Amino acid sequence: MSSYEARFKVWRGDEQGGGLEDFSVEVNDGEVVLDIIHRLQSTQAPDLAVRWNCKAGKCGSCSAEINGRPRLMCMTRMSVFDRAETITVTPLRAFPVIRDLVTNVGFNYQKAREVPAFVPPAGVGPGEYRMTQEDVDRSQEFRKCIECFLCQDTCHVVRDHEENKAAFAGPRFLMRIAELDMHPLDAAAETGLDRKRTAQDEHGLGYCNITKCCTEVCPEGIKITDNALIPLKERAVDRKYDPLVWLGSKIRRRSS
């Protein structure tokens, strides 16, 4: 097994401020960035704070920015970098730093609580739900989300404009709304909840300008923009601006 010395710049600090520190650390064949961060902890920086759990790309815990790109450290192989390259590891920029590479992602859990849950259809008991395979496949793509929040971090609406956070749910949770709105068994409309309207009026769907940056960084390969955000925008526009839909909503149905 061959090894070499790699140059790293790792952000150290807390909510009061900080900066990049230089390290030279051994790298072995087959290792990922998280391996190197662990080696730094064990040999040079025992107080380095980093969040991680599964090291298998399924928990979403080890999100960071590697050379400025939001990535999972456990899924970023050292072999993708040139051996002479200096690798920079910094915390997610869109969220407040707690310490070193650990950020406070509470914003995302707040937004999750603001999205109304699935509404079961009336008169259908557990085990009686029936869906076509096409509908199952569509929802299943969105349910692959591991909540690493890389899409939230790279979205410029959140990343570059702190003032937008109060009104904008971000791509992860707009995708959740789209999933529920597309679900053939969701009975939200029967309770008076219009998910398309709330997406536009309460969760900031209009802020999204479909740059696809969220799709580009998704480690699960979910087509967030094409399969969730654009269809949700189309549904919201049809609901709000299509003259026939508008007229139909104004005509009272005659009761039998």
Image (spheres, helix red, strand yellow):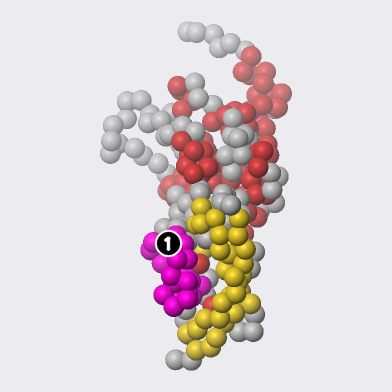
Under circle 1, the secondary element is: loop
The residue type indicated by label 1 comes to Trp
The one nearer the camera, 210 or 1, is 1
The residue at 51%/57% (across/down) is: 99
**In the picture shown, does residue 95 fall above or below 126?**
below
Q: Is 66 one of the magenta-colored residues? A: no
Q: In which quarter of the image is the N terminus?
A: bottom left
The residue at 47%/76% (across/down) is: 44
The residue at 59%/30% (across/down) is: 202
Q: Position of residue 127 (x, y in %)?
A: 28, 39
Q: Is 48 one of the magenta-colored residues? A: yes
The one nearer the camera, 73 or 235, is 73
Q: Position of residue 141 (x, y in %)?
A: 48, 52
The residue at 65%/55% (across/down) is: 213
**In the picture shown, does residue 206 fall above or below 3?**
above
Picture mark count: 1
Examine the image and state in which quarter residue 85 appears: bottom right
**In the picture shown, does residue 247 fall above or below 50?**
above
The one nearer the camera, 240 or 219, is 219
Horizontal relation, residue 204 to residue 77: left or right: right
Question: What's the magenta region?
Answer: 33-55
The one nearer the camera, 197 or 131, is 197
- The residue that label 1 is drawn on is 52
Quick check: can you spot residue 214? no
